[in-house]
Amino acid sequence: KLTLRSWTNSDDACACHPGVPIFHDRRTTDFSDFLSIVGCAKRRHNSEKPPEPVKPEVKTTEKKELPELKPKFQEHIIQAPKPIEAIKRSSPDGPMTNLELKISASLKQALDKLKLSSENEEDKKRKKTDEIKIGISCKNGGCSKTYRGLESLEEVCVYHSGVPIFHEGMKYWSCCRRKTSDFNTFLAQEGCTTGKHMWAKKDAGENVVPCRHDWHQTGGEVTISVYAKNSLPELSRVEVHSTLLNVHIGFEGEKEFHQNVKLRDVTDVKRIYVTMTATKIEINMRKAEPMQWASLELPAVKKQQKQKDNTTDWAGHGRKAITYFRNLNTV
């Protein structure tokens, strides 16, 4: 039964919890038991909802301006160099340049020791004369001279050092690349190289000398070394194009080494030098662009397409080309 005192709002009339409810670690699992917990403090009744507890203030550092956050040490900004525009590969149909050969003193001394006596040279000429038939034609490409006797051995031969190319209706030699669509005009082209007549077709397998060769590079240069001992300068030549390199080396006894290289990148033809020593031939090439080459040679193209193109071209030229090369290979 309520008494008057129970309605009196005195200082200790209300038994309450001054704190906030917390639900944690399940000390009381029943919500009704939680609500029936007797208050731990006494105070006056309050008809208004108490204010929300003030959240503790989190102290944060004041935001500093960007210049204050920068490191105090002195900065050095390094900028990458601007990319160099890629140098385009020139057309492989351009003319080849015959390089000057620098002969070292060691090679001159070695060749002096290997020179045959004049008697042995005369015997060699007589032996050649006995084997060559009068009227036989020179086997060098582009030369139409015929053998007339001993004087023909001393005659200068003007010929094409490269090979004939028939592609997309055009005909030309790989050495000088003077293109024409007429086959008779192609046959009448004067040679671009001078040397000695070749009255008998050489056996490629018998006269070829295998020469070891390698290469190395720096940032701006490429050096190719062909290890050819006692090579003959008068029978050797190095022809270059910005992306092509043809090396032909002659030795005693009509031995020879030949290598064609399609260069991986572009070179400066005006800054290519060849040095012949007693043990090797060194070719120093200046790169057109200072960059590392992934390889010396350009990766090979598909052979099937190339064979298809050659077959089509030969079919278009007919029997003239076949007859010409049969006569050229006849001894």
Image (tube, grey):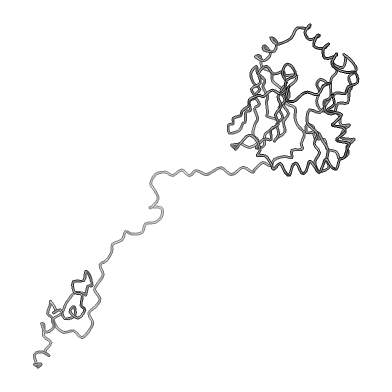
**Is 20 on the left-hand or right-hand side of 76?**
left
In the image, is residue 320 above or below residue 194? below
- Closer to us: 96 or 323: 323
Residue at image point 72% right, 16% down = 252
Where, quadrant-wise, is the C terminus in this rendering? top right
The x and y percentages for residue 298 are: 66, 38
Q: How many marks?
A: 0
In the image, is residue 316 above or below residue 32? above
Residue at image point 82% right, 42% down = 313
- Closer to us: 39 or 119: 119
Residue at image point 63% right, 25% down = 212
Residue 118 falls in image quadrant: top right
Where, quadrant-wise, is the N terminus in this rendering? bottom left
Residue 323 falls in image quadrant: top right
The x and y percentages for residue 122 are: 81, 9
In the image, is residue 69 above or below residue 295? below
**Is 247 on the left-hand or right-hand side of 20?**
right
The x and y percentages for residue 78 are: 50, 43
Residue 263 falls in image quadrant: top right
The x and y percentages for residue 318 are: 87, 40
In the image, is residue 16 above or below residue 55? below
Residue at image point 74% right, 9% down = 116
- Closer to us: 175 or 137: 137
